Image (cartoon, grey):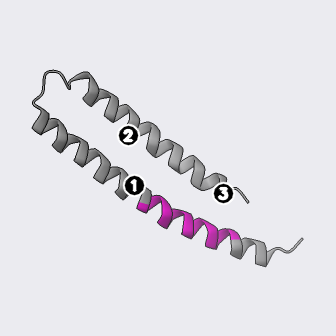
Amino acid sequence: MINFHKNELINSVLDHYYETFSHTLDTAEFVPEKYNQKINKYIFRNMKKAFRQIDRDDRKYQKQAKRKALECPT
């Protein structure tokens, strides 16, 4: 079964980080390479953090969905 809730959260996170990454590409020619590497590490570290948050939120959502399904059998 496809988890649409989690897919929507992932899409929103990826859209945000692709936009952020595109801004860094626009300035890559003017900023020293060492600083660009630090920026990229920062972006990807925060993206991993966001994915962990998505996983936590999804587990909570799945628990609530199971409870609702058990309470209201159809």
What amino acid is labelled 3 in the image?
A: Asn
Q: Dividing the image into 4 quarters, which one contains the N terminus?
A: bottom right
Q: Position of residue 22 (x, y in %)?
A: 33, 28
Q: Position of residue 9 (x, y in %)?
A: 53, 50
Give the CA separation, mark 2 to mark 1. 10 Å
Please give the label number shown on residue 3: 3
Q: Is residue 25 above or below residue 11?
A: above
What amino acid is labelled 2 in the image?
A: Tyr
Q: Nearer the viewer, residue 47 or 8?
A: 47
Q: Are marks 2 and 1 in contact (CB under 8 Å)?
A: yes
Identified at 36% across, 55% down, the residue is 48
Residue at the limit of the structure toward the front, as seen here: 33
- The residue to which callout 2 is attached is 17
Q: Is residue 26 above or below residue 4?
A: above
Q: Secondary structure at mark 3?
A: loop
Q: Nearer the viewer, residue 43 or 57?
A: 43
Chain-order first, disc 2 or disc 3: 3
Inspect the magenta stretch and tell me whether residue 14 lies in it. no
Q: Secondary structure at mark 1?
A: helix
* Residue count near mark 2 (Cα–Cα under 10 Å), binned few <14, some 14–19, many ≥20: some
Residue at the limit of the structure toward the right, as seen here: 74
Q: Position of residue 24 (x, y in %)?
A: 25, 30
- The residue to which callout 1 is attached is 50
Identified at 68% across, 68% down, the residue is 65
- Residue bounds of the magenta highlight: 52-65
Please give the label number shown on residue 23: none
* Residue count near mark 1 (Cα–Cα under 10 Å), binned few <14, some 14–19, many ≥20: some
